[in-house]
C-alpha cells in the first residue's frame, strides 16, 4: 500500500506548538514568526487533513477530537526526532546537561521522578545543580533552569512555559486538632497560626486573595528559611503550611498531608529557561517531558 502524503512539515510544527501552548500568539513567539504565519500554517494543515483542528473558546482555542489526536502524534514524532538527532550529535554519550533547580523543587519533585525521566529519555544524561535565590540572566555554569516564577523574564532567556502554578494550604492528619482545623472555612483558617517561609512571604496573602477570602492579614506562626523545611514541618504535624500543589501531590496521595481547601492558580508558572543564544535539542525533549509530568 502506498504511503499517504504528509502535509508540509512547517504546518505540522506550527500546529504542534499552538496545540501544546494553547495559543497561536505563544506559538508564534516560540517559533519566532508572526501570529498570522502560525494561523496560515494551521489553516493549511486543516485543509490538508480535511478536518478542523481548533475551535474558538472565548478568547482562547480548544482542540477538536481530531486536533487532540494529531497533537499527540505530532508531539511524539518531534520527541523521537529530537532524541535521534541528539544521539547522532553525541555518539559517545556527550556531556551531561546541567539543570539548575531550587532545592525544594529538586528534593520534593524532580528527584522522585528521575526514574520516569530515565525511561522516557534514556539518551539524556542529566546533572542536577541545586540553587537558591534568583537565577542570574546569563545562567552561568548551567545549561537550563527549572523554576516557578512570572514575567517579565530576562531578555537573554528562552522560556519554555510548562504549567500554571497552583498553591493551597495543607496539614498533616497527625496535627493536633486536625479534624477541627480541616473543617474551617478559608476565612476562619487565616486566624489559625500558619506556617510560612521567608523565601516567599506573599504566599498566604496571594492564596487568600485568589480564594476570595475577605478576612484581614493572615496570622503567621512559625517561619522557615526554605520551602523544603516548611513542608517537612507540615508533614511532621507542626501546623498548616502553604505549598505548590505539585510539591505535595505525592504526600496527599499517600495520606501524609490533607488539602481540604483545594488549590488556586497564582498567575505564576513552572518554566524551563535556557540562554536564548544556546541551541540544544535535548532541551526541547526535556521541556516536553516536564509538561507531561506536570500535567
Image (spheres, rainbow, N blue to C red):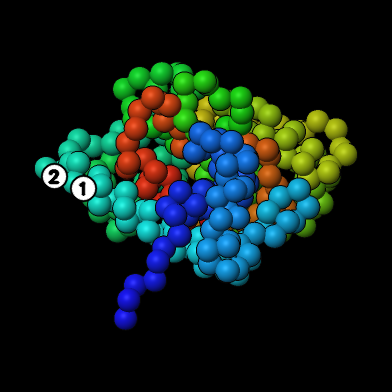
* Residue for point 11% across, 42% down: 92
Question: Of residues 99 and 169, which is closer to you in this image?
Answer: 99
The answer to whether 103 appears left or right of 218 in the picture is left
- Asked if 121 appears above or below 195 in the picture, the reply is below
Q: Secondary structure at mark 2?
A: loop
- Asked if 51 appears above or below 183 in the picture, the reply is below
Q: CA distance from mark 2 to mark 1?
A: 6 Å
Q: Position of residue 10 (x, y in %)?
A: 46, 48
* Residue for point 74% across, 33% down: 205
Q: Position of residue 108 (x, y in %)?
A: 45, 45
Q: Which residue is mark 1?
A: 87
Q: Residue furthest right?
A: 214
Q: Position of residue 204 (x, y in %)?
A: 71, 36
Label 2: how many Cα within 10 Å (few below 14, some 14–19, many 20+): few
Q: Mark 2 touching mark 1, by CB under 8 A?
A: yes
* Residue for point 17% across, 41% down: 90
Amino acid at each position: 500500500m502506498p504511503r499517504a502524503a504528509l502535509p508540509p512539515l512547517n504546518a505540522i510544527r506550527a500546529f504542534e506548538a499552538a496545540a501544546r501552548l494553547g495559543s497561536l500568539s505563544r506559538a508564534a513567539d516560540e517559533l519566532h514568526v508572526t501570529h498570522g504565519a502560525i494561523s496560515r500554517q494551521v489553516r493549511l494543515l486543516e485543509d490538508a487533513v480535511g478536518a478542523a483542528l481548533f475551535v474558538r473558546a472565548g478568547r482562547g482555542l480548544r482542540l477538536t477530537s481530531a486536533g487532540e489526536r494529531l497533537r499527540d502524534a505530532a508531539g511524539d514524532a518531534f520527541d523521537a526526532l529530537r532524541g535521534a538527532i541528539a544521539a547522532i550529535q553525541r555518539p559517545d554519550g556527550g556531556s551531561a546537561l546541567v539543570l539548575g533547580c531550587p532545592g525544594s523543587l529538586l528534593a520534593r519533585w524532580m528527584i522522585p521522578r528521575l526514574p520516569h525521566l530515565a525511561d522516557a529519555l534514556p539518551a539524556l544524561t542529566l546533572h542536577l545543580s541545586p540553587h537558591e535565590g534568583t537565577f542570574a540572566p546569563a545562567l552561568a555554569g548551567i545549561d537550563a533552569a527549572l523554576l516557578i516564577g512570572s514575567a517579565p523574564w530576562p531578555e537573554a532567556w528562552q522560556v519554555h512555559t510548562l504549567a500554571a502554578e497552583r498553591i493551597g494550604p495543607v496539614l498533616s492528619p497527625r496535627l493536633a486538632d486536625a479534624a477541627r482545623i480541616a473543617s474551617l472555612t478559608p476565612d476562619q483558617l487565616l486566624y489559625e497560626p500558619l506556617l510560612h517561609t521567608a523565601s516567599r512571604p506573599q504566599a498566604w496573602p496571594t492564596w487568600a486573595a485568589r480564594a476570595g477570602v475577605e478576612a484581614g492579614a493572615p496570622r503567621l506562626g512559625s517561619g522557615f528559611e526554605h520551602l523544603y523545611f516548611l513542608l517537612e514541618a507540615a508533614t511532621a504535624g507542626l501546623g498548616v503550611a502553604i505549598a505548590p500543589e505539585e510539591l505535595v501531590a505525592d504526600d496527599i496521595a499517600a495520606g501524609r498531608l490533607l488539602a481540604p481547601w483545594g488549590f488556586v492558580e497564582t498567575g505564576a508558572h513552572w518554566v524551563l529557561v535556557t540562554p536564548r543564544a544556546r541551541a540544544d535539542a535535548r532541551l526541547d525533549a526535556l521541556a516536553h517531558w516536564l509538561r507531561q509530568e506536570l500535567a
